[in-house]
Image: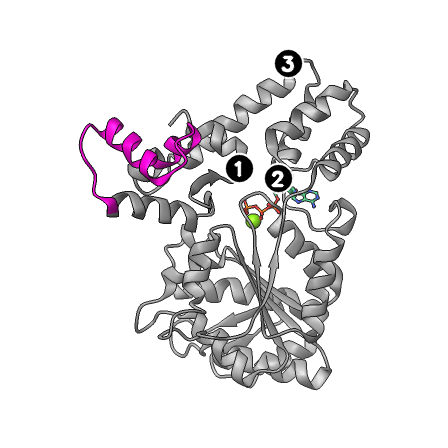
Amino acid sequence: MLFDPRPKTSRRELYDREDELQALEDFARRGSPLMVMLGIRRIGKTSLLRVFLHESGHPFIYIDARALEEQGYRRESLYRMLSSELTRLRGKWAGLVEYLRLLEGVEIGPALVRFDLVRRLPSLIEVFSRIDEWAVDSGRSVIVAVDEAQLLRYLRGGKGRIDFTQIVSYAYDHLRSIRFVLTGSEVGLLMDFLGFNDPGGWLYGRVRDELVVARFDHGKSIDFLENGFSECGATYAGSVLEEITAKVDGIPGWLTYFGYYYCKNPSPEAVQQVYEEAKTLAIDELRKLPSRYYALALKAIALGYSKWRNIKQALELWKGRPLTNAQVTRALKALSKLSLIEKVGDRYKILDPIIAGAAKEL
Ligand SMILES: Nc1ncnc2c1ncn2[C@@H]1O[C@H](COP(=O)(O)OP(=O)(O)OP(=O)(O)O)[C@@H](O)[C@H]1O
Ligand SMILES: [Mg+2]
């Protein structure tokens, strides 16, 4: 179902994205060792990645770095996720797991591939090197995909910790058949973490493939809604399509959200009701911003203060005291790195109209 609110995993449920799937396939076959998939929240990165992984036929390891958040960003948690992925792979690619058998600290039981977290934990470089040997010997590419990869930065920091960029850079130099796909919705933070422009970073100056996942244009947005409505059998006035597309500006996640709730309760008031709910969801997300200044800067932009000088004035008015230039710039930089805003000429703009609506109420 197109309006299924979960990330899609099958081609049948994914609308469009032919070119993006082809780009991923080209990358898997002959690209650089690293692909960075970029796009704002709800644009469909996870869906695209998962459909590609499930349908392309390449063996893959999929890590959702958000799962580490719950477990406190521990190295052991990453290994646990890896072991469950290897256990899954074992079903189809038994040979791959055999290559790991020679590695000290890997236990291969009848039903489980497990790492020895206590006595001898092999490094990820050792693990990926063995996987690469299998991939080379069997003429395949293994895809290692990390969703919300910017969160891996929290695993860094000395002994017993993991710098994933070091592993990718090792793969870059020594492994021929492992390809990494990293994606994240906080684009600036992801790029900072990867550090392509940081002379002190492991990936400094490395070539990578980049795939920017864009919003649907107006025609596709309408077509997406029409297809979804016909699947769920909802009756609707033609104006509903325009009303929804005007509110969400081609962001597939919001189109899906509106479609899902409209199908459940089709009525003339439904679009406005769903809009209010979407805004409430967005407000909850924005309340998690790490600083009140960030929220206020976003609110200022939402209310039409789009130039730096005007944003500063609005913030000072609300705070009731003068702010330093650095404070304002820091807030705007942080919002850009979170992919909430972008600067066009000398004006700042919010990238998602629902977020803009929500920000007015912060
Ligand atoms: N091309 C598409 N076809 C059908 N549904 C889609 C498509 N792209 C996204 N969706 C739907 O939109 C919602 C958001 O998609 P997804 O989770 O893949 O986006 P994301 O960019 O990973 O979002 P986030 O940044 O929040 O992780 C999901 O409900 C998904 O099913
Ligand atoms: Mg996602």
Q: Please say whether residue 309 is one of the residues in the magenta stretch.
A: yes
Residue drawn where x is 45% and y is 43% of the image: 341
Q: Nearer the viewer, mark 1 or mark 3?
A: 1
Q: Which residue is mark 1?
A: 352
Q: Which residue is mark 2?
A: 251
The reply to whether residue 135 is visible in this rendering is yes
Beta carbon at label 3 within 8 Å of ligand 1: no
For the N terminus, the quadrant is top right
Colouring style: one colour
- Residue 186: x, y in percent? 47, 51
- Sequence-wise, which precedes: disc 3 or disc 2? 2
Q: Amino acid at mark 3?
A: Glu
Residue drawn where x is 64% and y is 14% of the image: 269
Task: Check disc 2 and report its element: helix, strand or loop.
Answer: loop
- Sequence-wise, which precedes: disc 1 or disc 2? 2
Cα–Cα span, label 3 and label 2: 22 Å
Q: Which residue is mark 3?
A: 269
Identify the magenta region: 297-325
Q: Residues within 10 Å of mark 1 (few under 14, many from 20)?
A: many
- Asked if the residues shown at circle 1 and circle 2 are in contact, with their CB atoms under 8 angstroms apart, the answer is yes
Residue lying at the far top in this picture: please name it.
Answer: 268
